[in-house]
Amino acid sequence: MGIARTWSFLKGATIGAGLMYLLDEHSGGRRRALIRDKMVLGRRRLQMTADKRLRDLGNRIKGAWAERRARVVERPIPDDVLEERVRAQLGHTLSHPGSVEVIASRGVVTVRGPVLRGEAEKIREKLERTRGIRECNIEVNEVDDPSSVPGLQGQSRWQRKVGRRA
């Protein structure tokens, strides 16, 4: 029974101290306003995050629907659009995407240029999943030492991205 009374006393004392803190005639108003402002800010941030997530979900659903529809109704893709689509895919795959040249002609895509060792297979895998490509020719030179190739010098996309976080 003694422990229960002690806990009750401590709870009551904590609540009383909190009320004294908030209802103090000198600084209580400022403290209450600060708490109110934090609550308003928190609610606004939560609402903004929820709105952003809902917009993102809506855009993903629209994109998935458009992809499904495009696979059913296969239309020829103009060469310039196909080139840009391939460049976008390579931008997610290669460490130095600006070093390669992309040529598209009637659904046949050719990728040329220097890449780091191991990236040629990544290119092939990415292009096999890219809609609109009927055939892909990968004519890249895999390089072990990037210091000898101007297009592969400097920081890679990944190094710049990691450097920004640090």
Image: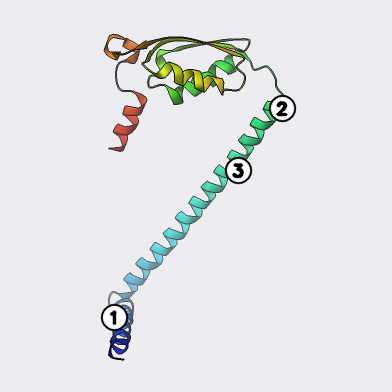
Nearest-to-viewer mark from 2 and 3: 2
Q: What x and y, as percent, mark residue 101? A: 46, 11
The dot on residue 17 is 1
Instruction: Give the residue displayed 48% in from the left and 51% down from the top.
Output: 49
Nearest-to-viewer mark from 1 and 3: 3
Q: Which residue is mark 2?
A: 72
Q: What x and y, as percent, mark residue 50? A: 52, 52
Instruction: Give the residue displayed 35% in from the left and 28% down from the top.
Output: 158
Task: Tell whether 8 sits left or right of 64.
Answer: left
Task: Tell whether 17 sits left or right of 73.
Answer: left
Q: Which residue is mark 3?
A: 58
Nearer to me, 79 or 121: 121
Instruction: Give the residue displayed 44% in from the left and 24% down from the top.
Output: 93
Instruction: Give the residue displayed 31% in from the left and 10% down from the top.
Output: 149
Q: What x and y, as percent, mark residue 89? A: 50, 23
Disc 3 marks which amino acid?
Answer: Gly
Residue sitting farthest toward the right? 73
Q: Quadrant of the C terminus?
A: top left
Q: Establish if 80 lies above or below 20.
A: above
CB atoms of marks 2 and 1 within 8 Å: no
Q: Quadrant of the N terminus?
A: bottom left
Q: Residues within 10 Å of mark 1 (few under 14, many from 20)?
A: few
Separation (CA) of disc 2 from disc 1: 68 Å
Q: Earlier in the sequence, mark 1 or mark 3?
A: 1
Disc 1 marks which amino acid?
Answer: Ala
Q: Establish if 3 lies above or below 139.
A: below
Disc 2 marks which amino acid?
Answer: Val
